[in-house]
Image (spheres, grey):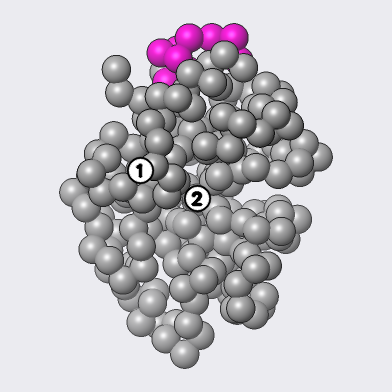
Amino acid sequence: MDFFDFHHHHKSNVYGIYNVEFGSVPPESPYSIGIHPKDIVMTSQEEQFHWLESNISKNCVAIGECGLDSMVLTPQNSQEQFFLRQIFISNEIQKPLIIHCVRKFYEVISLKKKAQQAVIIHGFNKKQRIAEDLLKNNFYMSFGKAVLYHLSLQDIVRNTPLNKIFLETDNECFNIEELYSKVSELKGISAEKLNEQVLENLDTIKNG
């Protein structure tokens, strides 16, 4: 069977949500589109948002990746400005947000108060305390390849409610069935049942 890939960068994969890179044209399959912190150019802000807004079609599932990243050169206030504007676009078009976050989780938690739609942290691989605080604030969590070998992350997956979980390949080259197999083992359910739950979670975030 096919397993749903919540966030990926592989255009050949049509069973999942393709992440559109800045400046690219969206595919005919489901996709997310946003302005990543690394791509922010303050002097081209209106042009960047024109690209984003003009490429939102019926196949757009979510706004993102967007968020905050302490490792890129873009100033924090500029990142927050772009992130907030994308939160407002998400509110306006009633699409969930896929968040990229590096060492700025508590700032993201604070800014989430502005969001009216579901918010998903993609590629989560941090500590249990951060996971607990995200879940307390009603975030969804998408997990990737690191779950296959990261023991403390496996504990986080065990403790994350099934109705808050997504699974993704991101930009890694591996078979997502491996990830479903590992997570289903951790959660004590079949991979097929896990896939059904992920699709149910997808319906939930799409329908508010």
In the image, residue 58 sits, relative to residue 197, either above or below, namely: below
The quadrant of the image that shows the N terminus is top left
Q: Is residue 180 left or right of residue 165?
A: left
Badge number at residue 17: 1
Q: Amino acid at mark 2?
A: Ile
Q: Tell whether label 2 touches label 1 (CB within 8 Å).
A: yes
Residue 171 can be seen in this image: yes
Q: Which residues are magenta?
A: 187-195
Residue of label 2 = 98
In the image, residue 86 sits, relative to residue 131, either above or below, namely: below
> Residue 2's x, y, as percent?
30, 23
Residue at x-position 64% and y-position 80%: 75
SS class of the residue under badge 2? strand
Q: Nearer the viewer, residue 170 or 60?
A: 170
> Residue 158's x, y, as percent?
67, 21
Q: Amino acid at mark 1?
A: Ile
